[in-house]
Image (cartoon, rainbow, N blue to C red):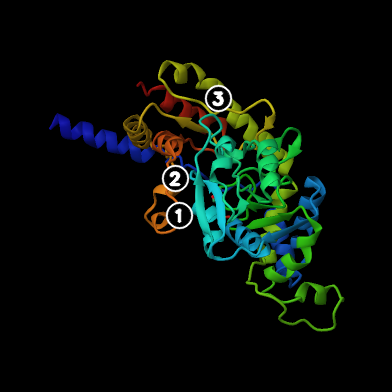
Amino acid sequence: MVFHLINVLFLVQLTMTPILSFNKSSLVGRELEFIFQTISNGQIAGDQMFSKKCHGLLKEVLQVCSALVTTSCTHALEMAAILLNIQPGDEVILPAFTFVSTANAFVLRGAQPVFCDIRSDTLNLDESKLEELITPRTRVMVPVHYAGVGCEMEEILEIAGRHGVAVVEDNAHGLFGKYRGRWLGTFGCMATQSFHETKNITCGEGGALLINEERFIERAEIIREKGTNRARFFRGQVDKYSWVDVGSSYVMSDVLAAFLYGQLEKWREIQAKRRAIWELYDMELADWASANGVRQPVVPEHCEQAWHMYYLLMPSLQARTEFIARLKDKGIMAVFHYLPLNRSAFASNLASAPTDCPVTKDVSDRIVRLPFYTSMTEKEQRRVIHAVLEWKS
Ligand SMILES: Cc1ncc(COP(=O)(O)O)c(C=O)c1O
């Protein structure tokens, strides 16, 4: 009877405590006003006023040759693979610890993924392992700036340059982060951004292709517009548009671009808020982490991170499982991600030679991401911190 009562009280308490989700989309400025404006103007297809504003802002801030918003980062990566003429049998080197799209975009063109292990400090592609993975078939390397902390781009560019291999940055996490004082996304011949709901700046689903070499610009416009020269037609450079190349439908609707521009124009405020959240986690959890064998994120001095996520490396897989379950009991949703791509069932049919990536396996077992979103209040964050501090190894 008493046991039953305790259970009921526990359930009542749980249902009264709001669930604290891992991510929540945040309105930061004039997103809704801009959506209303684009619909009122009758301009909801792609490449209208707000898409152009997004292109302009990204180009101006980052000083890239061209920026094109796309339906997703996945699609921007696919565009990069087409632009580099990736062919069956070509090889692409990428970290084993990344999202499937980093691989899929190139695999769709017939390329073989070659998985590189990651550094144990930043969890970025380990540049010291690159050289041994290069073969005469290697066409491209795709460093991923994990958590918005820059990869060692100096070394990566030097190795790629020496072997005549292209570099495409998967910068899904890293918009407005810097490496040695230079914006992430400006090192490779191209870079891709994500504006998915979980990213710092979002429109629900969306992305961008950043182009750092003039020679790709015209063809990128064509590939993005179903393989037609429609962009030239809109600019009055041709009197009709026609099919001139391969391509697909990678153009973002202006309704989403309107939302996106509402966020992009507030990028400094968004980054400042996220910085405050990240720093509070880092400071408040420092003593607890060192006492319990938990590792906090490492950000090298020469990297200005993008404040994208706050993760912890738990002492073991079992500790992580228990930790996530404990937080869940308190209504707090923490998550882990990236199962090692090199160990996935699909990769075993594809990879040219199986690569052992022990650091990726270890990190994938132990990583946990704490709730983190731009509109997170200090009260919400203190609730997470309080729950985390109660966990002991
Ligand atoms: C490293 C990385 N690359 C690419 C993507 C794909 O982004 P999108 O959902 O915009 O296609 C993600 C998604 O989170 C990612 O983490």
Q: Give the quadrant of the N terminus.
A: top left
Q: Amino acid at mark 1?
A: Ala
Question: Helix, strand, or loop for circle 2?
Answer: loop
Q: CA distance from mark 3 to mark 2?
A: 34 Å
Q: Nearer the viewer, residue 47 or 14?
A: 47
Residue located beneath label 2 in the image: 355
Q: Badges 1 and 2: C-beta atoms under 8 Å apart?
A: yes
In terms of image quadrants, where is residue 348?
A: bottom left
Q: Badges 3 and 2: C-beta atoms under 8 Å apart?
A: no
Q: Earlier in the sequence, mark 1 or mark 3?
A: 3
Label 3: how many Cα within 10 Å (few below 14, some 14–19, many 20+):
some
State the count of labels. Answer: 3
Q: CA distance from mark 1 to mark 2?
A: 8 Å
Q: Nearer the viewer, residue 41 or 104?
A: 104
Q: Give the quadrant of the C terminus.
A: top left
- Quick check: 102 left or right of 303? left
x then y, percent, for residue 359: 45, 35
Residue located beneath label 1 in the image: 351
Residue furthest out toward the front: 136
Residue located beneath label 3 in the image: 282
Q: Residue at x 72, y 49 (%)?
A: 264
Q: Amino acid at mark 3?
A: Asp
x then y, percent, for residue 300: 63, 27
x then y, percent, for residue 375: 59, 40
Dot in front, 1 or 3: 1
Q: Residue at x 34, y 29 (%)?
A: 319
Is any part of residue 375 visible from this angle?
A: no
| In the rendered image, the vertical position of residue 105 relative to residue 46, given as above or below | above
Q: CA distance from mark 1 to mark 3?
A: 38 Å
Dot in front, 3 or 2: 2
Question: Helix, strand, or loop for circle 1?
Answer: loop
